[in-house]
Image (cartoon, rainbow, N blue to C red):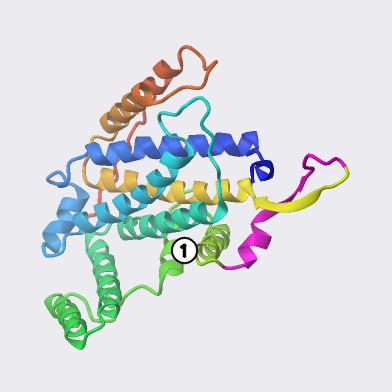
Amino acid sequence: MENERFPVPAHASAVFTEIAQGLRVTWHMLRSSPIEPNSGSNLARADDLYPFEKVSVRARHYVSAALEHLIMWADFAAPLKFHPDQATMFTLQPALALARAALESAAQAVWLLDTLDPVECVRRHLRLIRWDLEEHRKSHLEPDGKDRVKQRENELVQRVAQVFTERDIRPPQGYLWVIQQACRPDDLALDPAPVERLWRAMSGAAHGMYWTNQELSKIEVNEGPDPNRSRTVLVPDADIMAEALDAAFRMTQYATLKYLTYAGADIEGLVGGAQRWLAASITLKPGAASDTRQRLAALRLSPDPIRMEE
């Protein structure tokens, strides 16, 4: 097995590192932010419109779930602390499975918050709740359990009947549809068609589909100790892994920033705190520039808050 290891190309390794550190900054920002949205913020106004299952709670959950998946990958791929002799073995299925989970989780938050109309935000929120209840009902094996969840859904539909018809708040048409809708914001650099291709690859890898071994791997020649004998082996395509993880990271980072902005959080302060934390926590490679920590800590992001319509 030792002889079948192949180094990750330098450009893909750089992408992995950038994603991992970007995720840590984003995760730190979310964890450092208040759980309750600030009074007068977009999310506070949406919560006032529908104070039962709050929009802000679900939005934070979607973002947190996405980050948890990707932070698990980051801690494996680029740990903050590592031994000089440590080596990381990258494999295809786990990386793409985690990327898929993050993409699907974050896409729900992006679609939910991609509107300036608080009533429309609540409508999308109700659609996601009904989808959640639909899946929850399927998880019960006994009729009584299914009936209890169905009753909760019926109560929700009746509660908002004066504003929305049942069709208005029907569940979304599945994860791919939500992901496609989440790719629509102009300031999110994700194209629906390539993202669909990546999502199908992620799903295939997560489900153990054989075609992913062929389409998402590269043939490498293993010379071995005997110069007269060699054999070819399939190794994960690092570029595909980087592309999938980058798409999941972009969606997740965008969802987090959108959530924090709509919650009325101090984005610039959160970014500064996260950058300083990362600069103090990271293990630098031998030979890194002496001012690397200072440059990491000095980075800033100027927020551009968007307010919902009155």
Q: Is residue 185 left or right of residue 227?
A: left
Where, quadrant-wise, is the C terminus in this rendering?
bottom left
Residue at disc 1, secondary structure = helix
Give the image location of residue 306, x and y in percent. Answer: 29, 45
Residue under circle 1?
180
Q: Residue at x 14, y 62 (%)?
A: 49
Q: Is residue 280 left or right of residue 204?
A: left
| Residue that lies at the very extreme toward the top in this rendered image | 290
Answer above or below: position of 240 versus 303: below
Q: Is residue 138 left or right of residue 97?
A: left
The answer to whether one can see residue 92 in this image is yes
Q: Nearer the viewer, residue 234 or 4?
A: 4
Answer above or below: position of 117 versus 274: below
121 in the magenta segment: no
What amino acid is found at the position of numbered circle 1 in the picture?
Answer: Gln
What's drawn in magenta, residue-wise?
Answer: 209-227
Give the image location of residue 234, x and y in percent. Answer: 69, 54
| Residue that lies at the very extreme toward the bottom in this rendered image | 143
Q: Residue at x 52, y 17 (%)?
A: 288
212 in the magenta segment: yes
Give the image location of residue 223, x and y in percent. Answer: 79, 43
The answer to whether one can see residue 310 in this image is no
